Image (spheres, rainbow, N blue to C red):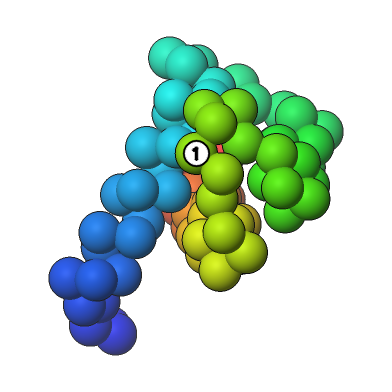
Amino acid sequence: AAKVGSGQVRNLMHCVGKFSKDFGDRPVGAVHRKELSAWLDDLRRGGSTDGEGLGDTTKNNVFRSIRAFYRWLKREGIV
């Protein structure tokens, strides 16, 4: 198994926290693909529901992290 650095863990926690803030208490499996795609597209276009004014690098990191998170959830049979 590949080792994960503390910076990667912090980044993932930030991204999942943003996801949680935007989608509330809904289980990840209850967020439909269409909603997730729209959220990620909006994020990449510059939208930010919390007014953070995310930079391009941060938006791309959130996009990649959440995409990887969902791939993992799918691989594990969670969604």
For residue 28, say whether it is visible: no
Query: Which residue type carries mark 1?
Result: Glu
Quadrant of the drawing holding the N terminus: bottom left
Q: Is residue 16 visible?
A: yes
| Closer to the camera in the image, 27 or 14 | 14
Q: Tell me the quarter of the image containing the C terminus.
A: top right
Please give the residue where the numbered disc 1 appears in the rendered image. 52
Residue toward you, 47 or 5: 47
Q: How many marks?
A: 1
Q: Position of residue 4 (x, y in %)?
A: 25, 76
Q: Position of residue 30 (x, y in %)?
A: 60, 21
Which residue shows up at 47% across the image and 16% down it?
24
The secondary element bearing badge 1 is classed as: loop
- Residue 34, compared with residue 75, is above or below; it is above
Q: Position of residue 73 (x, y in %)?
A: 49, 49
Does residue 46 appear left or right of residue 6 in this picture? right
Drawn side of residue 60 relative to residue 62, left or right: right
Corner quadrant of residue 33? top right
Q: Residue furthest top?
A: 25
Determine the residue positioned at 24% across, 71% down.
7
Residue plotted at (37% across, 37% down):
17
Q: Given the current orientation, which residue lies at the most extreme left position?
A: 6
Q: Nearer the viewer, residue 40 or 3?
A: 40
Whether residue 55 is situated above or below residue 14 in the rendered picture:
below
Q: In the picture shown, does residue 13 fall above or below 32?
A: below
**Image location (x, y in percent) of residue 5:** 21, 77
